[in-house]
Image: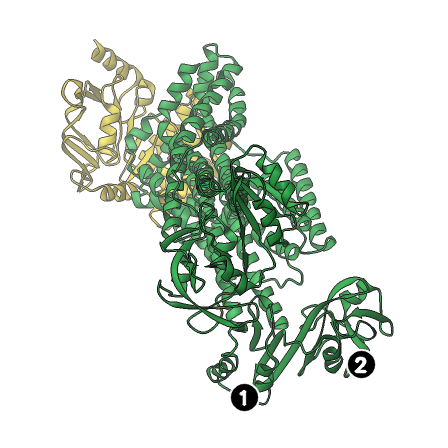
């Protein structure tokens, strides 16, 4: 765990999210308070329907919370317009999704550069080279997503998330569709980018092995933050989960 | 399976709406055309039936130009059972307008108005002439155009051009008679009509009477030179003749309807294709749970049957409305068509409308339905549907090349190997065009990628990421993009073709006009009958303001058994001499136009024998052969003095006048008008006026055709909108990803607009190229001595408008895409 004096990357306060009305009302989040430190790799865990994806969507400005506040760095998300949120995502947030991460019409390199192109920024060539080498894709740059394996596709997505030096990367089940070897590779890359590039990563997962790669794991159940463990191992994560289910 | 098909329709109602709209418009147009035709034909029938009900038997001359004598009328009156028989006169008698000139380019027709039960004239105001030989009636339109009112005195010329004055006592409606409506009518008593026209007999004898076998008895009395009809037969023939133009118009309109349906078929084909592709998993699931291939096929076909029927039914309603609207507009514009019959949707129209809509829809859905049967059950288990990669098959190339060669070959043969101006040539060229179009249709998917790269070059650079992604997306599914754009291509091709054709026709006719009419003014009589008195030209000849005055006299004659015009000229003329020499023609000499020389099989030095009025048949030695194209001279030209000895002193047929350079046109015009003021039948024409009239007609025609093609374009735009919205639906997750990565809503909208722009431009460009090439081919095939003119600004406008229309078509799909929630889109699938 890296201890720094830097302010936290993401802070959520009293976050609630309610879907539907009346009888159909579903409380996806019930007053979640959580802080994600800069330069840390945090995993969000919980059983299906615990609200972990909703939490991530609200933190990343993809969805708006019913009440409560979210800060990304010094910016408060509450009350931002769609355009402001879009620009915030563009400048400060990176994403790695479970599937369908890449645009099928673009080559791997074009996909990696996409966030920079969208915001019309010049690529930092040194960073670009370093990222490409870190994920080991130099000989695959001209390929289109359909010509890449699932693991390679996720590595392209990783590289894309890293290239814009975002304040935080949100990864939603990044290994969900991969075999265990490719999955392990991706998780190592995530950890490496935290250790070596000082990146902040928040990962949603339901896999204890994946969660064990993180510095810290927070557990969600029925929309509430139940507990958290630092320096997790697969076993400690599993034990906590079993306790939660009980 | 029925339940699945219906459920499928319910689920995709919105998506199928645009498709239905395409069919609705097509069927609406076709049904509307039929309704319009039916209504107008019904109007004709109603009128003639009412008219002809008064006549029991009508006698007409067998020869359409012949007449029936008074003796025949008397013989018919003597037939047992005949209560009354009246001859009708119908001969030209020019009405003189308030400007002292005869009205119109052809003389008005004088008709006799009988009294009693056989009177079929529809007097709409005032009264008929009755027994007053000094009274006359006019048709409403002529009276209105010439500003004559009941009570005015009107002037009509008799056969010898002498003026006679009459009191205008009433106005009549010429009814369904298209010829009378065209020439205008002046009605007199039978005696006056006879006196004014010098008619040698009647054009029709109407008979009233009640006796069995009346028709046979009258026929026996009328003799062999007449055709006898019952009143009903007469009515049927009149309605038929009156409706002829409307039927031609109907066929023309139906051709545009066919184009619209073809475009609609492409749109339907594409929509079903995309829907099937999107429902791959659904189809696979059906197969998993035991549906056979036939059942899957059947469910898609059933869907198309329902769509086709429902859309066609709405189309019929639209057609009914369109026809009612067209009739209202026609009625408001005083068109010479009966627009007052009840608008009816005939069972035949309903049947045809439904059948056309249904057949087109189902046929267009057959291929997509077949591809649905190819979905393997295992596809249901795959989470992600793989992006289709498109490969060009060898067969596609083979067929495309074959069609292209056949098309080009046929067109080339039509253009270079066949005589221009003949209908078969045009048909051959158009068949070549159709074959080439098929080649383009087959090659479409191959062409899309390079074309989108070329067309998208600027947008991709101008609009950054959205631009680049849009250009990539436009060619992402080449088959789909090709079908979408081809629909637009059809409309743009035809528009360009028409525009090249009309521009070329204009230029060609102008050029011919300049050659044929190399003069400032031309004097001739109305309908080229009678002549311009020689004194007119002789009075003008000495004027210093005029550069030249050319008089041409001619009259029909027989030369070695063939009919030709023989004539002479006075003044300066420079014919193009092919062989021989034409320095003054003395007695017994003749100059022949080349075609006459060829037909008579003579050359310079040979002799032809021409019949004359005064000198019997005279031998004429050929001294020159002249180029007959655009010649102002008649087929045979003899010297001026000899012509007078052959044919007495005939008046001039035409006088051509050129103004001296620098003299103001108004001044000479007034002078020439003064010279002909005393001769009401002599009319003045100038090349600018002829050109202006021609331009007006051509512009009108072009506007109408463009308007009608607009329907096909509209349907193809629906196709673009449809394809885009289906693509947007398909790419929901992709759009969500882009939005998550920081693409703003306006950027996403712009991306789709650019994609539509690129599709529109591709369709337009292919259309412009095809339309240009086949416009050229059509010009070569239709016009002899064609001058090609490509209206570049107009064609550029087509391309720009197509692009803009594409962007317009993208508005709704783009809004929907931009509005979608990111989280929701990411979660689906």
- Between A150 and B608, the residue placed more toward the observer is B608
Q: Nearer the viewer, residue B342 or B250?
A: B342
Label 1 SS: loop
Question: Residue B487, how many percent across, how many down?
Answer: 50, 41
* Residue B245 rendering spot, x and y as whole percentages: 53, 47
Q: Pointer 2: residues within 10 angstroms few (<14), some, or many (20+)?
A: some
Q: Earlier in the sequence, mark 2 or mark 1?
A: 1
Pinpoint the chain carrying mark 2: B
Q: Left of A165 or right of it: where is B475? A: right
Quarter residue B788 falls in:
bottom right
In the picture, one chain is yellow; tell me its letter. Answer: A
Residue B811 seen in this snapshot: yes
x, y percent for residue B239: 51, 42
Element under disc 2: loop
| Location of mark 2 (residue) | B587
Q: Which colour denotes chain B?
A: green
Q: In the rendered view, tell whether residue B419 sits above or below residue B98.
A: above
With respect to residue A98, does A7 lie above or below?
below
Give left or right: position of B735 versus A242. Answer: right
- Asked if the residues shown at circle 2 and circle 1 are in contact, with their CB atoms under 8 angstroms apart, the answer is no
What residue did someone put label 1 on? B545
> Does residue B473 appear anywhere in the picture?
no
Q: Chain of mark 1?
A: B
Measured Cα–Cα span from mark 2 to mark 1: 34 Å
Q: Which mark is residue B379?
A: none
The image quarter in which residue A222 lies:
top left
Q: Is residue B716 left or right of residue B625?
A: left
- Assess disc 1: are there few (<14), some (14-19) or many (≥20) residues with their C-alpha within 10 Å of its C-alpha: some
Do discs 2 and 1 share a chain?
Answer: yes
**Can you give x and y, in whole percent of width and height, for residue B786 in the image?**
64, 62
């Amino acid at each position: 765990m890296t201890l720094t004096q830097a302010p936290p990357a993401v802070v959520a306060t009293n976050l609630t999210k309610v879907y539907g009305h009346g009888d159909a009302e579903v409380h996806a989040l019930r007053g979640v308070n959580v802080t994600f430190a800069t330069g840390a790799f945090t995993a969000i865990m919980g059983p299906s329907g615990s609200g972990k994806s909703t939490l991530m969507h609200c933190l990343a400005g993809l969805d708006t919370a019913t009440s409560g506040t979210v800060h990304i760095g010094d910016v408060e998300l509450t009350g931002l317009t769609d355009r402001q949120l879009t620009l915030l995502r563009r400048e400060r947030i990176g994403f790695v999704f479970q599937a369908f991460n890449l645009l099928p019409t673009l080559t791997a390199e074009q996909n990696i550069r996409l966030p920079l192109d969208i915001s019309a920024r010049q690529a930092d060539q040194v960073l670009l080279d370093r990222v490409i080498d870190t994920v080991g894709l130099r000989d695959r740059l001209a390929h289109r997503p359909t010509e890449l394996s699932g693991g390679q596709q996720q590595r392209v997505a990783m590289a894309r998330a890293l290239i814009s030096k975002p304040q935080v990367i949100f990864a939603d089940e990044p290994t969900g569709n991969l075999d265990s070897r490719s999955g392990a590779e991706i998780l190592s890359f995530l950890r490496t980018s935290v250790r070596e590039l000082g990146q902040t990563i928040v990962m949603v997962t339901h896999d204890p092995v994946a969660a064990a790669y993180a510095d810290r794991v927070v557990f969600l159940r029925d929309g509430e933050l139940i507990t958290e463990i630092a320096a997790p191992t697969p076993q400690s994560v599993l034990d906590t989960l079993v306790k939660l289910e009980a | 399976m029925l339940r699945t098909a219906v459920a499928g329709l319910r689920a995709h109602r919105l998506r199928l709406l645009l498709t239905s709209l395409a069919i609705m418009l097509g069927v609406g147009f076709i049904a509307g055309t039929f309704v319009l035709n039916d209504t107008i034909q019904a109007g004709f029938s109603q009128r003639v039936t009412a008219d002809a009900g008064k006549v029991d038997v009508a006698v007409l001359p067998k020869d359409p130009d012949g007449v029936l004598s008074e003796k025949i009328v008397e013989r018919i009156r003597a037939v047992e059972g005949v209560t009354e028989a009246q001859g009708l006169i119908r001969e030209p008698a020019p009405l003189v307008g308030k400007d002292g000139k005869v009205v119109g380019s052809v003389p008005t027709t004088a008709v006799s108005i009988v009294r009693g039960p056989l009177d079929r004239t529809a007097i709409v105001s005032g009264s008929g002439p009755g027994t007053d030989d000094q009274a006359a009636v006019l048709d409403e339109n002529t009276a209105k155009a010439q500003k004559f009112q009941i009570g005015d005195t009107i002037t009509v010329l008799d056969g010898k051009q002498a003026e006679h004055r009459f009191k205008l006592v009433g106005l009549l409606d010429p009814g369904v008679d298209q010829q009378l409506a065209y020439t205008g009518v002046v009605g007199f008593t039978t005696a006056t009509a006879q006196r004014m026209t010098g008619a040698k007999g009647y054009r029709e004898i109407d008979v009233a009477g009640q006796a069995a076998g009346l028709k046979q008895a009258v026929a026996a009395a009328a003799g062999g030179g007449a055709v006898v009809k019952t009143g009903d037969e007469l009515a049927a023939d009149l309605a038929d003749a009156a409706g002829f133009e409307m039927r031609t118009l109907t066929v023309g309109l139906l051709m545009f309807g066919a184009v619209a349906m073809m475009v609609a078929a492409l749109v339907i084909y594409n929509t079903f294709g995309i829907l099937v592709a999107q429902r791959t998993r659904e189809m696979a699931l059906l197969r998993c749970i035991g549906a056979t291939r036939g059942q899957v096929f059947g469910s898609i076909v059933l869907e198309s049957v329902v769509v086709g029927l429902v859309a066609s039914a709405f189309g019929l309603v639209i057609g009914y409305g369109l026809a009612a609207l067209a009739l209202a507009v026609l009625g408001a514009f005083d068109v010479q068509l009966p627009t007052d019959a009840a608008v009816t949707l005939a069972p035949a129209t309903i049947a045809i409308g439904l059948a056309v809509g249904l057949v087109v829809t189902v046929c267009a859905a057959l291929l997509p339905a077949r591809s649905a049967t190819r979905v393997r059950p295992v596809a249901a288990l795959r989470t992600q549907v793989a992006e289709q990669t498109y490969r060009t098959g060898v067969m596609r190339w083979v067929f495309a090349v074959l069609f292209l060669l056949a098309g080009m070959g046929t067109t080339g043969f039509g253009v270079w190997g066949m005589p221009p101006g003949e209908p078969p040539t045009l048909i051959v060229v158009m068949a070549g065009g159709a074959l080439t179009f098929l080649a383009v249709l087959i090659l479409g998917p191959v062409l899309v990628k390079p074309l989108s790269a070329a067309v998208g070059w600027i947008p991709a650079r101008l609009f950054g990421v959205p631009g680049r992604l849009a250009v990539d997306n436009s060619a992402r599914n080449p088959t789909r993009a090709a079908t979408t754009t081809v629909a637009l291509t059809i409309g743009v091709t035809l528009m360009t073709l028409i525009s090249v054709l009309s521009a070329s026709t204009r230029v060609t006719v102008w050029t011919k006009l300049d050659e044929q009419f190399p003069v400032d003014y031309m004097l001739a009589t109305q309908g080229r009958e009678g002549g311009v008195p020689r004194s007119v030209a002789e009075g003008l000849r000495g004027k210093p303001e005029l550069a030249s005055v050319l008089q041409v006299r001619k009259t029909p004659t027989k030369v070695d058994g063939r009919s030709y015009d023989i004539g002479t000229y006075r003044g300066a003329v420079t014919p193009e001499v092919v062989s021989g020499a034409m320095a003054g023609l003395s007695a017994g000499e003749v100059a022949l136009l080349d075609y006459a020389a060829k037909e008579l099989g003579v050359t310079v030095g040979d002799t032809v024998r021409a019949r004359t009025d005064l000198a019997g048949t005279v031998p004429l030695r050929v001294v020159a052969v002249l180029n007959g194209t655009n010649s102002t001279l008649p087929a045979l030209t003899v010297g001026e003095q000899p012509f007078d000895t052959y044919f007495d002193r005939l008046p001039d047929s035409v006088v051509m006048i050129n103004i001296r350079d620098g003299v103001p046109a108004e001044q000479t015009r007034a002078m020439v008008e003064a010279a002909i003021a005393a001769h009401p039948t002599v009319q003045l024409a100038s090349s600018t006026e002829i050109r202006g009239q021609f331009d007006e007609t051509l512009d009108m025609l072009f506007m109408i055709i463009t308007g009608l093609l607009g329907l096909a374009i509209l349907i193809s735009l629906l196709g673009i909108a449809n394809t885009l919205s289906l693509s947007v639906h398909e790419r929901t997750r992709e759009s969500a990803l882009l939005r998550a990565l920081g693409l703003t809503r306006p950027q996403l909208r712009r991306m789709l607009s650019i994609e539509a722009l690129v599709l529109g431009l591709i369709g337009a460009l292919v259309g412009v190229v095809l339309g240009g090439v086949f416009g050229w081919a059509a010009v070569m095939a239709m016009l002899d001595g064609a001058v090609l003119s490509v209206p570049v600004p107009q064609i550029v406008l087509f391309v720009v408008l197509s692009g803009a229309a594409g962007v317009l078509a993208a508005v709704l799909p783009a809004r929907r895409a931009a509005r979608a929630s990111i989280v929701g889109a990411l979660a689906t699938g």
